[in-house]
Image (cartoon, rainbow, N blue to C red):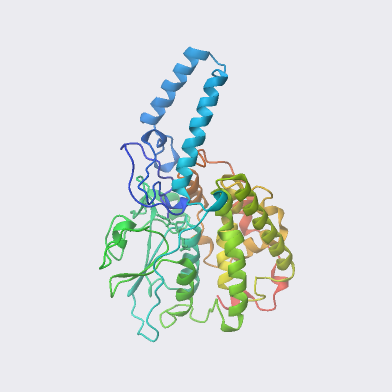
Amino acid sequence: MATSATALACGSSGFRSGLFGCPCSGRLSNAAGFRWPESTRGIERKGQLSTCRAEQQQDWVKQVGKALWGRGLPPGALVDVARQLWGTGWQVMMGQLAPSGEKGAYDRPQSQFRGRPVPGAPVIPGNFHLYVATTCPWAHRALIVHTLKGLDEAVPLSVVVPGLNGLWEFSSGRANAAGAAAGKFVGTKDRANGQSRLMDAYKMRKEGYSGRATVPMLWDQGSMEVLNNESADIIEILNSDFNELAKNPGLDLAPSLLKAEIDRWNSLIYHDVNNGVYRCGFAQGQEAYEAAVEGLFKTLNMLEEHLAASRYLCGDSLTLADIRLFTTLYRFDSVYSILFKCSKQKLFEFPNLYGYLRDIYQIPGVESTCDMPAIMDGYYRILFPLNPGSICPVIPKSSESPALTQPHGREKLSKVAVGAIL
Ligand SMILES: N[C@@H](CCC(=O)N[C@@H](CS)C(=O)NCC(=O)O)C(=O)O
């Protein structure tokens, strides 16, 4: 999985080309070709502050400040100018990072590829290839379903990591030795197309490509085409289309009887929770932010109540709706609560939601898909406008293993043990 830290690299100058999507992607640029100025990019991999130019510049600035004002703050007028400049710079950067609609509300771009495997076509191992990153909550969904269904041979995986230049890239895996030693998914080579960046894998499609190179992405090796790059579709495909070769074909995370209920949860949770946390973090106005926070916590409170009497969202059966909620809850206290200002309450203050998080975390296979250090690096070191100092906060112990492996006591809510099907 993610090599670890990332992406605000020392080095080149000017403005990077490319497209911006989700922050945890490692992307620093957007469709307009915006690129963070070099002076903001003083971080190296492995979470170490670099000793390169950015740090030397900081020392130089400190010396000038000291010579001019001693240890006091600069004169008020200068602070005002700095505030104006920084405020404008922030708005410019946020405008590029997160497209916004009315009143500064975040407007997530639509996924471009929404294909499905041909119904009834023979399932050939390796015909489809899945690209994921473990930092990304959307790709994390796909990785969990892939793992639970046992699709490693049927649909081989490649794992990208946020690269130094801000693009998703492939890796040898050695960079995240700690993750590998802990049995996590770590960065891999491009096992389908042999490329070094995800963007180049997208470009292997016959018609070429110049859009956002997002994860997750399901690649059709037979026709050299991006079949689908929308996680909501990809998890449905993984759940139902490769059963002939799945190691766990009996696990159905979207039984037809529950379809309507799953869809109802999905649309509610997507808007207010999955994308809701981004609507908080990427809001570019107080009103938009407060509206997003209100929707988020109203829905979390409603879920808290529902989960008091129901083991999973749809009763006794773990479904795709649970997987979709899980990947947001897993990042909540460590990332969204802090970086995205979803700070009204911590997740661990909701006993049922927190127990539910632990319950799913403890399903065999799920923990291996969860790499908190890589997630922290992916968000805190990439999102410069939200975290200019790139400082990674110390997070509550409750967000990580071993706290997440503590008993959850939720078995009593279900009649069928999930272990029976997994
Ligand atoms: N709606 C998409 C969103 C995927 C997405 O935004 N992925 C981010 C990572 S968290 C990404 O790859 N962004 C890269 C970019 O936009 O360039 C899905 O659910 O699959």
Residue 9 on image: x %, y %? 37, 40
Residue 14 on image: x %, y %? 32, 38
Is 335 on the left-hand or right-hand side of 143? Answer: right
- 49 versus 320 height, above or below: above
Residue 132 on image: x %, y %? 41, 61
Q: Is residue 354 visible?
A: yes
Residue ID at (51%, 56%): 107
Q: Which part of the image, by quadrant, shows the C terminus?
A: bottom right
Q: Which part of the image, by quadrant, shows the N terminus?
A: bottom left
Residue ID at (38%, 72%): 155
Residue positioned most to the left: 206
Residue 237 quadrant: bottom left
- 147 versus 7 height, above or below: below
- 82 versus 26 height, above or below: above
Residue 227 on image: x %, y %? 36, 71
Q: Is residue 384 visible?
A: no
Is 163 on the left-hand or right-hand side of 417? Answer: left
Residue 198 quadrant: bottom left
Residue positioned most to the bottom: 120
Is 107 on the left-hand or right-hand side of 160? Answer: right
* Ligand 1 in which quarter: bottom left
Q: Which is more toward the observer, 81 or 7?
A: 81
Q: Which is more toward the observer, 186 or 318?
A: 318
Q: For the image shown, how many numbered marks are present on the structure?
A: 0
